[in-house]
Amino acid sequence: MNKMRVVGYRLWVMGVFALLALACNPDAKYATKDVEITITPYTVSAGYVECSFETNKEAYYLIDCVPAKEGYDPTQPENQKPFMMLALDSANFKYLEWRHYLLQEGETNIAPFASHCLQYGDINHFFTHLTPSTDYWIYAFAVDPDKLQPVGKLYLKKITTTPTSVVDVRFEYLVRGYWDYIYPLNPDGKINNHFPYFAATVDSAFLVNELDSITPEEYFTELFTAYAESKVSEFVRYGVQVTYNDGIDSHEEFQKGNTYYTAIVSFDGFIGNNVIYRFNWTGEDFEKRFTDEDSIVSDGEDD
């Protein structure tokens, strides 16, 4: 065997051993043993909770926030493994339904279970659509994504949502040409990116011609109630929203000379803090900023 072949063989052997070492290192891709997860709830409000998750190792893990069942304690040792198995099965069922839908639609580039359903590393997460004055368990546990099995300990933190919102948020609304902007603001004027709310705009002509002249209040009450009952997350907005159209599903552009109504309501476990703005759109040069004082409904308070 000549010198060049010997060198090449040695390099090949070294590469094989390097790959084997990498494969045997549990921290090279993700850890499945001795994973510790710290759960820290921050803001606990009527309809959502902000929570951080920190891990001692880079690991895949499952999280959720579920209502506490009376008479059932997941902290008991005999309940922990079944709790984790049920939680993982539930996540997998939802994943399979999602994947099945995409495959039916002809989509083949589908994210694997781990990247779609599991967390990785330290994160900050918001659980929304919670019920006021209700006990919840926030949980986390490590998962082996190859075997789709829970690993190690179940981590739990119990919280109780508040009767009403503990977050003070006001909204500013700007119409500039064909664009409208919504700014949820804290009392100090800074943007709040985490407070949930609904918003929509409707042409007054639509209320008159298509809905037998119902009032804007009636229209938005029915619309937002349907949003809340549907529990579809796409309806809930967070942070600054920018829209090019009249705000409803038809995506029709503003029409010059038409009168429009825009409603913004908080949705922190319930619908509240109602504001409705009215404006006559005069064309691409139209520009107006609205605050709570410009609302055509006078309560401005949570229901």
Image (tube, rainbow, N blue to C red):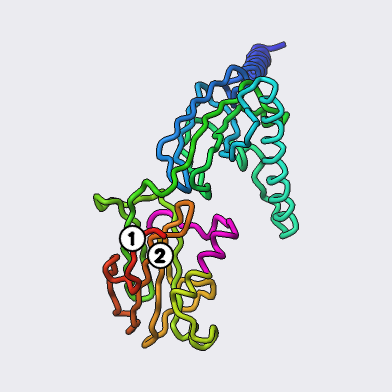
Q: Residue at x 57, y 21 (%)?
A: 35
Kindly identify the residue that appears in the image at 64 percent across and 22 percent down: 76
| Residue 293 sits in quarter | bottom left
Q: Is residue 232 magenta?
A: yes
- Residue range highlighted in magenta: 223-240
User: Which SS class for mark 2?
Assistant: strand
- Measure the C-alpha gap from mark 2 to mark 1: 8 Å
Judge by depth and name the residue closer to the eye, 215 or 55: 215
> Do callouts 2 and 1 mark residues in contact (Cβ within 8 Å)?
yes
Q: Residue 114: x percent and y percent?
A: 63, 37
In this view, the residue in front, 53 or 272, is 272
Are there few (<14), some (14-19), or many (20+) residues within 10 Å of tag 1?
A: many
The residue lying toward the viewer, choosing from 102 and 129, is 129
Relative placement, left or right, of 27 versus 240 is: right
108 relative to 29, above or below: below
Q: Position of residue 301 (x, y in %)?
A: 35, 60
Quadrant for the C terminus in the image = bottom left
User: Residue 202 lies in what quarter of the image?
Assistant: bottom left
The disc at residue 18 is: none
Please state if 45 lies on the left or on the right of 186 as rendered: right
Q: How busy is the neighbourhood of tag 2: few (under 14 within 10 Å), some, or many (20 plus)?
A: many
Label 1 residue SS = strand
Disc 2 marks which amino acid? Ile
What is the magenta segment's predominant secondary structure? helix
Identity, as a three-letter code, of the amino acid under mark 1: Phe
Residue under the image location 34 percent in, 59 percent down: 183
The residue tagged 1 is 171
Vertical relation: 144 (above or below) 184: above
Quarter of the image for the N terminus: give it. top right
Q: Position of residue 33 (x, y in %)?
A: 62, 18
- Can residue 4 be seen in the rendering of this structure? no
Label 2 sits on residue: 264
